[in-house]
């Protein structure tokens, strides 16, 4: 929810052509290259879709970390910053697509996959309609009460998550759609300002709960070696896929190098996707 909420779509329109091409091909090239390397290296853990999940995981970047780094370095409005944000938006869209496909990977029926996209489209339509015609009236009434702004925005997130659950979609996908519908909202800045502290609290809980589930890596050193290999592959793939792509778009040597550098942190969304895959039995 917060990942998409913090991205200003309007600012990204200035470089729409470069963003569109790089946003599509960054994931596709990263996915194909890393998949080929993982298959060649024989990296697998006994699951049916290990290579697929690994390739998806290393092809998407951490919006939360990257956006924070760009803000801290005052590079959010530079050319490299805008292109980086645009690619992150497309990565979130790729993540939504994969979340829609996830439940049907074992039985990839075309009708089921199409229904997943139809449900996603319907949910996006519902949330955008409500956020455009009803939410402005509600937020206008409560704008002077910060606590209500926070509670209402979180309530909106949970409402869309519940509708997504009723549609047979993942809660994470519902949260993404809820964030998209508020990202271009007139009160977006106020919502982000109020939700920052609670975001940090939930992120802390997220990583603590994640750490509690991880077995002691010292007991299995092979996992550490594999993790190191995957990390190196993730870094190498970023550069060899992105630098030629950005140079072909005539962004210049410096920007072509900065963008893959900005995108190095692997997404926390990869952890969510992997956790869902584990629960389904894919990995």
Image (cartoon, rainbow, N blue to C red):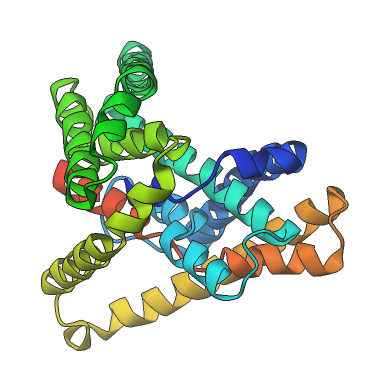
Could one spot residue 102 in this view of the protein?
A: no
**Percent x, y for residue 271?**
30, 58
Quarter occupied by residue 132: top left
| Viewer-closest of 61 and 77 | 77
* Residue 203 coordinates in the image, percent (x, y): 25, 65
Outermost residue to the top: 111
Looking at the image, residue 99 lies above or below residue 3: above
Give whichever of 19, 269 is nearer the camera.
19
Query: Residue at 29% of width from left, 45% of height from top?
Result: 48
252 displayed left or right of 150: right
Q: Residue furthest bottom?
A: 218
Q: At 87% from the left edge and 61% from the top edge, which residue is drawn? A: 252
Query: Where is 173 relative to 33, above or below?
Result: above
Q: Residue at x 55, y 41 (%)?
A: 90
Q: Would you say 149 lies left or right of 227 here?
A: left
Looking at the figure, which quarter contains the N terminus? top left
The one of 274 and 177 positioned closer to us in this rendering:
177
Quadrant housing residue 214: bottom left
User: Would residue 154 be found to the left or right of residue 31 on screen?
Assistant: left
* Residue 249 x/y as whole percent: 83, 48
Look at the picture and state if 261 lies above or below 136. below
Q: Residue at x 16, y 86 (%)?
A: 219
Q: Is residue 200 visible?
A: yes
């Amino acid at each position: 929810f917060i990942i998409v909420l913090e991205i200003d779509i309007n600012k990204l329109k200035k470089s729409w052509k470069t963003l569109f091409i790089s946003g599509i091909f960054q994931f596709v090239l990263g996915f194909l290259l890393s998949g080929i390397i993982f298959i060649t290296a024989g990296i697998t853990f006994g699951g049916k879709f290990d290579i697929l999940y690994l390739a998806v995981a290393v092809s998407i970047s951490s919006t939360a970390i990257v956006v924070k780094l760009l803000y801290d370095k005052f590079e959010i409005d530079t050319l490299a910053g805008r292109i980086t944000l645009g690619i992150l938006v497309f990565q979130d869209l790729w993540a939504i697509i994969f979340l829609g496909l996830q439940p049907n990977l074992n039985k990839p029926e075309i009708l089921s996959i199409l229904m997943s996209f139809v449900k996603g489209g319907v949910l996006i339509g519902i949330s955008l309609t409500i956020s455009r015609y009803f939410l402005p009236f509600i937020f206008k009434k409560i704008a002077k009460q910060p606590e209500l702004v926070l509670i209402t925005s979180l309530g909106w997130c949970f409402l869309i998550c519940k509708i997504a659950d009723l549609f047979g979609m993942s809660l994470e996908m519902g949260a993404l759609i809820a964030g998209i519908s508020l990202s271009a909202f007139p009160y977006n800045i106020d919502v982000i300002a109020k939700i920052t502290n609670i975001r940090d609290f939930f992120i802390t809980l997220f990583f603590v709960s994640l750490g509690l589930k991880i077995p002691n890596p010292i007991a299995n050193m092979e996992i550490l070696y594999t993790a190191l290999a995957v990390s190196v592959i993730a870094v190498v793939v970023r550069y060899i896929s992105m630098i030629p792509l950005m140079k072909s778009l005539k962004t210049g040597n410096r920007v072509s190098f900065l963008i893959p550098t900005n995108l190095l942190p692997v997404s926390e969304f990869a952890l969510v996707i992997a956790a869902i895959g584990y629960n389904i039995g894919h990995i």
